[in-house]
Image (tube, rainbow, N blue to C red):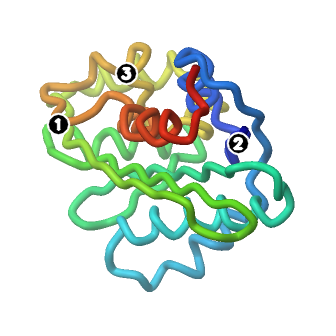
Amino acid sequence: MEKLLLASTSPTRKKILTNAGIKFIYRTPLINEEKEKKKLNNINKPEKICQSLAKQKSIKTSLKYTTHLVLGADTCLIYKKSFLSKPKTKEMAKQMLNKLKGKEHKIYSSLYISKKGKKIWNYNDQARLKIRKLTKKEIARYICGLKLKKIQQSGLYQIENSGVTLFEKIEGSYFTILGLPLTPLLNFLNKKGLII
């Protein structure tokens, strides 16, 4: 029987797979993500950057863990055709919320599964979101309530927690927004006999 390895340290992705009853192990992806993003900087389509990062996480990790199907995943926030990286500080998070308030943006998630460096399956999805016209006080209160480590791991808003209150409109899969489009992944895993 095939075994699944998640090439991610994301607590959210681990929780989604665990809650779905999927048996898996996880490892840190064997790429330097910041270095890879810089190399991909000249690509005009943020979606392509996301796809490339998910692919590299999977392929490179699968060359070390050769007995597993390796799942690489990447999620990006796209605003006006630009890739917005996760804020590194609370001040950067505040600036980003100010930029996005009252406006639409996209969350794009890419999944890639490989074994021994060869592609087995991939999937891409996006969701459209619109943040309310937040006041300075609302932004300050929201940012104050976040832990910096959580912002750095999961991004600007955690929709599974109080981040859901930021939005006026959400179109698309909840799991895509969390960074792991679940239904298509479950369909694939079911065909591979990884769901009991």
Looking at the image, is mark 1 or mark 2 earlier in the sequence? 2
Q: Can you identify the residue that label 1 sits on?
A: 130
Crowding at dot 1, Cα within 10 Å, few <14 / some 14-19 / many 20+, comes out as: some
Residue drawn at (86%, 61%), measured in percent from left and top? 64
Instruction: Report x, y in % for residue 62.
Output: 75, 60
Looking at the image, is mark 2 or mark 3 earlier in the sequence? 2
91 vs 64: above or below:
above
Crowding at dot 3, Cα within 10 Å, few <14 / some 14-19 / many 20+, comes out as: some
- The span from disc 1 to disc 3 (Cα, nearest Å) is 12 Å
In the depicted view, which residue is nearer to us: 132 or 13?
13
Residue drawn at (69%, 60%), measured in percent from left and top? 115
Q: Evaluate if marks 1 and 2 touch, with contact meaning CB atoms under 8 Å apart.
A: no
- The span from disc 1 to disc 2 (Cα, nearest Å) is 40 Å
Residue drawn at (61%, 32%), measured in percent from left and top? 194
Q: Is residue 3 left or right of residue 139?
A: right
Q: Can you identify the residue that label 3 sits on?
A: 163
**Secondary structure under the numbered disc 2 in the rendered image:** loop
Q: Residue furthest toward the bottom?
A: 42
- The span from disc 2 to disc 3 (Cα, nearest Å) is 36 Å
Instruction: Report x, y in % for residue 105.
Output: 22, 48
State the image quarter where residue 31 is shown. Answer: bottom right
Q: Can you identify the residue that label 2 sits on?
A: 2
State the image quarter where residue 170 is shown. Answer: top left
Q: Amino acid at mark 3?
A: Gly
42 vs 79: above or below:
below
